[in-house]
Image (spheres, rainbow, N blue to C red):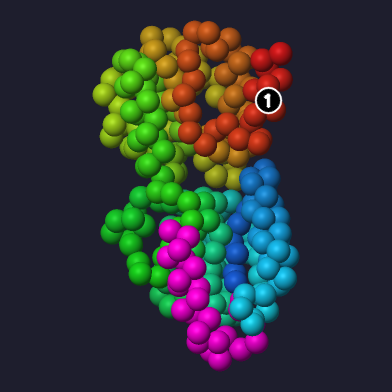
Amino acid sequence: MKRIISAALAASFLAAPAFGAEVKIGFVTTLTTGAAIIGKDMQNAVDLAVEHMGGKMGDLDVNVIYGDDGFKPETGKQVTDKLVQQDNVDFVAGFIWSHVLLASRKSALDAGKILISTNAGPSQMAGDLCDKNFFSTSWQNDQTPMAMGEVLNQKGVKSLYVMAPNYAAGKDMVAGLERTFKGTIVGKDLTKWGADAQLDFSAELAKAKASGAEGLFVFYPGAAAGAFTKQYHQAGLKDILPLYSVFTVDGISLPKLQKADR
């Protein structure tokens, strides 16, 4: 995938007169709300990459214009519209959240821009919404939970309780697990997502404990991951209901897990 993207970038740079003296990259991420902890990591990574390249791509200066999606699909679309129509960027990149990418994709692609997702991987964009100008540096959402389903089969797990946020990526994660897991899903909760995402999982954890499931599968990114892992330990489920997750243990949630295990 990296080779494909590099080829696309190189081909675009051959038409340097169309760009002028610089290449403009619009980068959409989350820079406010609790989800900014991920977005600022992404911003720092881009800034570091540009610094390592000496601020150049070929003979062109790099101008990165950041847009804050505010963790909302409608805001993400507005930001993308501005980058395309007012800033006239050559590339639109970024996107943490699948629902933000799905809302914004048309604005970039219909304008003939190359769209590069650095995280979000909604299944629709590998299917009906596939486009020759869309590239991903990450994954399709279904892939990792499909692998988890196979791991659970190998471990002999026969039943699961499932929890995930109610948005595009959460639904894809659950669908991927269900595609490969051969056991029984005894219960499922899709919780509220967005800027006012649900962070109290006590009711769902009580249901999971009472379900008799042999394991608990979850997908919770960002701040929700930290909240979930803390409550999972507080509920005393560690030795009762083994936890299986994708994209939940990260730099945000790991310190909480470590603290709870002491």
For label 1, the residue is 256
Q: Is residue 193 visible?
A: yes
Question: In the rendered image of this protein, does residue 166 appear above or below residue 243?
Answer: below
Chief SS of the magenta region: helix
Closer to the camera in the image, 219 or 258: 258
Q: Quadrant of the N terminus?
A: bottom left
Residue 31 in the image, given as x and y percentages of width and height: 68, 54
Please say whether residue 73 is visible from this viewpoint. Answer: no
Residue 163 x %, y %: 45, 28
Q: Position of residue 34 (x, y in %)?
A: 67, 43
Name which residue lies at 71% across and 13% down: 262
| Residue 129 against residue 144 in the figure, above or below | below
Number of numbered labels in the structure image = 1
Q: Residue at x 36, y 57 (%)?
A: 125
On whether residue 15 falls in the magenta region, the answer is: yes
Residue found 28% across the figure and 20% down from its top: 183
The residue closer to the viewer here, 77 or 143, is: 143
Residue 79: quarter of image:
bottom right
**Which residue sits at x=54%, y=64%?**
93
Disc 1 packing (10 Å; few <14; some 14–19; many ≥20): some
The quadrant where residue 105 appears: bottom left
As drawn, 165 above or below 26: above
The amino acid type found where label 1 is placed reads: Lys
Residue 188 is situated, as x and y percent measured from the top left of the image, at: 38, 26
Eyeballing the image, is 31 above or below 240? below
Image position of 165 (left or right of 154): right
Residue farthest toward the bottom in the current orientation of the protein: 17
Instruction: Name the secondary structure under disc 1.
Output: helix
Magenta residue check for 239: no
Is 231 on the left or on the right of 44, as rendered?
left
Magenta segment, which residues?
1-24
